[in-house]
Image (tube, rainbow, N blue to C red):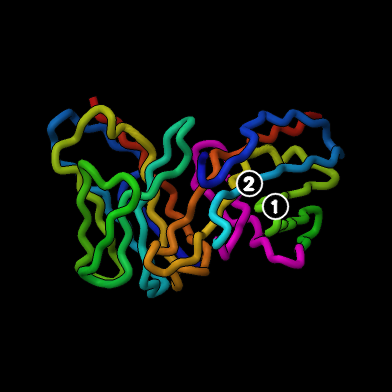
Amino acid sequence: RKEVEQDPGPFNVPEGATVAFNCTYSNSASQSFFWYRQDCRKEPKLLMSVYSSGNEDGRFTAQLNRASQYISLLIRDSKLSDSATYLCVVIPGAYNQGGKLIFGQGTELSVKP
Amino acid sequence: DVKVTQSSRYLVKRTGEKVFLECVQDMDHENMFWYRQDPGLGLRLIYFSYDVKMKEKGDIPEGYSVSREKKERFSLILESASTNQTSMYLCASSFRADRDPKDFGPGTRLTVT
């Protein structure tokens, strides 16, 4: 089983749609969770951190479910500029693991006019 | 904003050549990382460093070495480049390895022929 798994998509949605991505992780001791966005041929950029209480940033909402070991990202009112690959990222949390980011494969989103 | 820069955006080398990829960050971060990204495999950690002259192997260190002589600079070395090292190489840095998300450089797309 992969440490972090995502549905690779692609998700093709019309402008204005609401779209949700899920991601599961295998290490129950994982402490830190993030969503990154990566545009074609560019580096990943932090979109938002994911907190246990859930957090919202404009049209984006991130949730963490520790019991089921998954995190989610909800995008409301999709824009053309939201088209990108969304990477689910987990830090296992043990310092001797180097704080390395464990990446999911990424979910491709394409927002159409 | 953290600025992470990489010496080249595109690089073409021949099999057997020694290749140096340079990464520099300007925010006094202790931690620096080298990843490679390949289609279908996502981002994988090659090496990381918590401090000057300190290095730790990541998940795929074979065929690579690193050097960190100064805090701001982390070099990835391909001792004898091979075609299976054709990839996108991404450098990242962070202040605290176990919590802070990483800031990435723009990437170096290396082709080994």
Given contact means CB atoms under 8 Å apart, are the residues at marks 2 and 1 in contact? yes
Mark 1 is surrounded, within 10 Å at the Cα level, by few (under 14), some (14 to 19) or many (20 or more) other residues, namely: few
Q: Is residue A93 left or right of residue A9?
A: left
The picture places residue B103, in percent across and down from the top left corner, at 48, 60
- At 28% from the left edge and 55% from the top edge, which residue is drawn? B57
Image coords of residue A5 (percent x, y):
58, 41
Lower sequence index among marks 2 and 1: 2
Q: Residues within 10 Å of mark 2 (few under 14, many from 20)?
A: many
Q: Chain of mark 2?
A: A
Residue span colored magenta = A30-54
- Quadrant position of the C terminus of chain A in the picture: top right
Q: Which type of secondary structure does the marked residue at label 2 adopt?
A: strand
Q: Amino acid at mark 2?
A: Thr
Q: Amino acid at mark 1?
A: Ser
Checking the image for residue A68, the label placed there is: 1
A37 lies left or right of B73: right
**Mark 2, residue position:** A24
Q: Quadrant of residue B68?
A: bottom left
B27, A35: nearer the viewer: A35
